[in-house]
Amino acid sequence: MLPDNYLLLAPDGTVVDNSDAHVAVSLLPREQAVGRNIFQAYPSDPQSQQALHASHEKVRRTLQPDTMPLLRYDLERPTALGGGTEQRYWQITHFPLLDERGELQYILQRPQDVTEATLAMQRAEVVQREFNEATERNHFVLQSMPVMVWTTRPDGWAEYFNPRWTEFTGRTLADTLGEGWVADLHPDDIASTTARWNAARQHGTSYQVEYRMRRHDGRYRWHLARGVPRLGPDGQIQMWVGCNADIHEQKLMVEELLKANEEQAELSDQAYRQAQLTRQQRETFNTLLTDAPAMITIVRGAEHRYEFANTLFRELVGGQDVVGRTVAEVFPEVVSQSVMALLDDVYRTGEPFVGTEVLVQLASPDGSGTLRDAYFNFTYQRFEEHGEPAGITAYAYETTELVKTRLALQELDGSGATAALPE
C-alpha cells in the first residue's frame, strides 16, 4: 500500500483501489469507492468533473503523466460528519501504468490537498486588496484636502507635503523637503517658529504657531500651523503630522477691530485663539484622517450615508456613531437647510463647493429641541469609482466663536464705544 494520497483507476475511470491516506482525505470509506466510476464515487460540480475528465483523456491519449492546474473539486461530506459539501482545492498529477505490451493498464492519481494553503492565499489577497484600496483612498483624501498637510521624521526632517503647500509657494517639492520649507517663512517669523518647533520636538508636545508664508506672487499671508507627534508602543516619537490653514483675512480683521477698541483686546484675542485651537492628533499616519484638526467625513451614495467620520466630527454630534446612517438621520434639523441642497448638487454635478462662514442651525446638545447658530468653513468634493459618482468627502472647520467675536466687536465699534478714545 502506497504511503501517500493515491487513487488507482482503470482506464475507463473505475476505482480499483486507493491508499489509506486517500481514504482519509476523500471522506469516503474504501468499500464505497472501489468498483464505482470516480465521478459516481466522488461527485462534484460539472465544471470540476470536466477538468478532471480532460486530464484522464490526455493520459489515455498520450500515455504520459499529466499535472493539472490548481483544481477546485468539492467533496460530499458524509452524514456522520454533518452532511453537505466541503470546499477543497487540489494539485493533481495522473500517471499512466502500462502493461508489458506498452498498453495502458491503470491510471494512478496523486491528489495533494492544498485547500488550507489556497484559502490562506485567497484571504491574504483580500486583505492586501482592502489595504491597497484603503491606502489609495487615504492618499486621495490627503492629496485633495483643502489645507496644507505635512509630515516629518522624529528629528523634524520634512518628508511629505501635499500639493496645497507647493501650489501656494510656487516652489518645487524637492526644494521644500528637509529644512527647505523654512525658506517659505517671513524672515521676522523664522526665529520664533523654529524655537517653538524645536521645543515641541524636544519635549514631545503638540506644536502650534502662527507665521507668515510667502505666496508664489511674493506676498506674505498669515498661516496657523499645528503638529502632533505620533508615538510608538515604546513611547518614542515615530513621526510628526501636521497641517497649515490660511488665516490671513481673519488675522487682519481681528487685529483691525482690536485697534478700534483696546478695552476689548484681551477678550478678542482669547476668542480668536479659541476659534483656532483644535484637538491633538494621537494616531499613526494611516489614521491621520481620524485625528485631523478638521472635521472630515465621507458620505456614500445619493442618500449621503456616512462611511467615515473623524474624531472632531463625532464630537460635534456628541460622540454618537454615525457610520451607516444618512445625513438626514443624524441631522434631521438640516434637511430643509441649504447644506442638504448643496450635497445633492455636488453629488449630481461633480462641481466642488467651498463655503466660508456658512450658517447652519443645529439642534442644541442639551436635548431641548431648540436650534443654535453655528458657522463653518467647509468644502464638499465628489469622488468617483469606476467612472461613476460614489460619494462626497467633506472637510469643515467650525468658526462660530470667531464669527460671534467679530460681530460683537463690530457692534461695539458701531455703537460708538471707541468715540472716547483720544485721537
Image (spheres, rainbow, N blue to C red):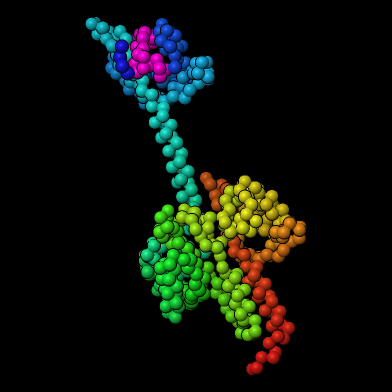
Q: Can you say whether 9 is above or below 325 in the image?
A: above
Q: Residue furthest front?
A: 234
* Quarter of the image with the C terminus in it: bottom right
Residue drawn at point x = 58 percent, y = 53 percent: 309
Q: Range of the magenta residues?
A: 5-26
Decide which of 299, 258 is in the foreground and name it. 258
Kindly indicate the quadrant of the structure image that contains residue 331.
Answer: bottom right
Q: Can you say whether 179 is above or below 290 in the image?
A: below
Number of marks in the rendered image: 0
Decide which of 175, 194 is in the foreground and name it. 194
Q: Residue furthest left?
A: 100
Kindly indicate the quadrant of the structure image that contains residue 203.
Answer: bottom left
Residue 142 visible to an observer of this rendering: yes
Q: Residue furthest bottom?
A: 423
Residue drawn at point x = 62 percent, y = 81 percent: 265
Residue drawn at point x = 76 percent, y = 58 percent: 368
Q: Residue furthest right?
A: 369
Kindly indicate the quadrant of the structure image that contains residue 297.
Answer: bottom right
Q: Position of 52 compared to 337: left or right?
A: left
**Location of residue 405 in the rendering, given as x and y in whole percent from the top left corner:** 66, 74
Magenta span has 165? no
Magenta span has 13? yes
**Location of residue 226 in the rendering, given as x and y in whole percent from the top left corner:** 50, 67
* Quarter of the image with the N terminus in it: top left
**Location of residue 80 in the rendering, given as x and y in whole percent from the top left corner:** 51, 15
Residue drawn at point x = 60 percent, y = 75 percent: 270
Q: Can you say whether 303 is above or below 410 in the image?
A: above
**Location of residue 384 in the rendering, given as x and y in whole percent from the top left corner:** 54, 49
Residue 140 visible to an observer of this rendering: no
